[in-house]
Image: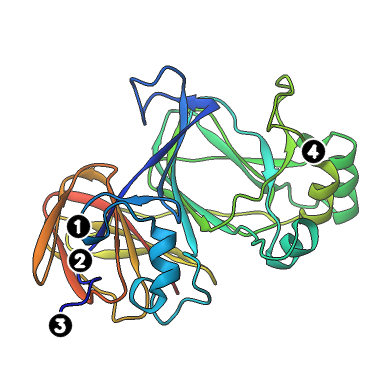
Amino acid sequence: MTSPFAAPLVLQAQFSERVWGGRRLAPEAPSPVGEAWVVYEGNVVAGGPHAGRTLGGLSGAHPAEVLGSRAREERFPLLIKLLDCAEWLSVQVHPDDGQARELAGEGQLGKTEAWHILEAEPGAELIAGVRPGTGTDELRAAILEGRVMDHARRQPVSAGDTVLMPAGTLHALGPGLFLYEVQQTSDLTYRVYDWDRPPSAGRALHLRESALVTTNAQAAVEHSGPPRAGEAQELTRCDYFILERLAGGEAVEGDTRGESFHAVTVISGEARLRWEGGEVTLGALDSVVVPAALGTYRLEGDFTALRSRLP
């Protein structure tokens, strides 16, 4: 009997307007769109036997088949976004799992995330941690007194760079960046500074919480050359995910082995995803989840893609 998860799950992205957003993701939208949530538990499956169901609903009902043996719980564990930054995002920090439960309640998760820069205008930069030598007490006082920018560490970035951002690390994305973000399934954010923009609904500062969870760590910007044709190049890993860059030109082989789903987002070109029993064509910025139960597959064509999976 054929498994109901013997085919990839093609997902419908969800777009969100943001005060700092640009025009790359939805040029025809009436207001700037900052985020596309391309793989997360609320995404709806676009076709096939599971059309109309959400990724989270399928994960909860069929955890072994969708998530795989490495999953720690039945909730879909990752949230993958595309971000188009025309202005500075707020300076913010995320709690770890224990802090999330303590500050926001049982069932809440922390947020460790990683960024992969797809496009960067000349001079583009981001904030990734604090300046070396900043003490913990000094940082806490600066947050509470509204002086966090005295200690924020700005770093230049270029297309192809990757930044792993552990929970507790001060961070912000700057203008002129278009990027891929993979993170724990959590939207728990503490806003430290918002560039003196007028206060508005949903954009309050969280100075007390930020002072409790922000560490004096610095996050490194990793520079990696382009992968060879047919290669799966590891960009970063942590306790929550592995992020890889895939280069077409030659076939890229994949195998879930029943251990983890593979979330694939094409970032340029066009890819044909083939498996025993079918194929689907993915254009630029399309995303698909290969269920853990599917097993072997291959990606063919002239493309570059990013793949996230469980460690």
State the residue at coordinates (57%, 38%).
126
> Mark 1 or mark 4, which has the lower sequence index?
1
Q: Estimate the x, y position of residue 106 in percent, counting from the top left.
A: 72, 65
Check contact, mark 1 vs mark 4: CB within 8 A. Answer: no
The residue mark sitting in front, 4 or 3, is 3
Q: Is residue 208 above or below residue 61?
A: above
Q: Viewed as shown, does residue 162 lie left or right of 134? A: left
Mark 1 closeness class: few <14, some 14–19, many ≥20 residues within 10 Å: few
Marks 1 and 4, how far apart at CA: 50 Å
Q: Is residue 309 visible?
A: no
Q: Amino acid at mark 3?
A: Met
- Residue in the foreground of this view, choosing between 298 and 148: 298
On the image, numbered disc 2 is attached to which residue? 7
Check residue 148 in the rendering and tell me which mark sits there, or answer none: 4
State the residue at coordinates (42%, 62%).
57
Check residue 1 in the rendering and tell me which mark sits there, or answer none: 3
Q: Amino acid at mark 2?
A: Ala
- Residue in the foreground of this view, choosing between 77 and 168: 77
> Mark 2 or mark 1, which has the lower sequence index?
2
Location of residue 225 (image quadrant): bottom left
> Mark 2 or mark 3, which has the lower sequence index?
3
Q: Estimate the x, y position of residue 148 in percent, counting from the top left.
A: 79, 38
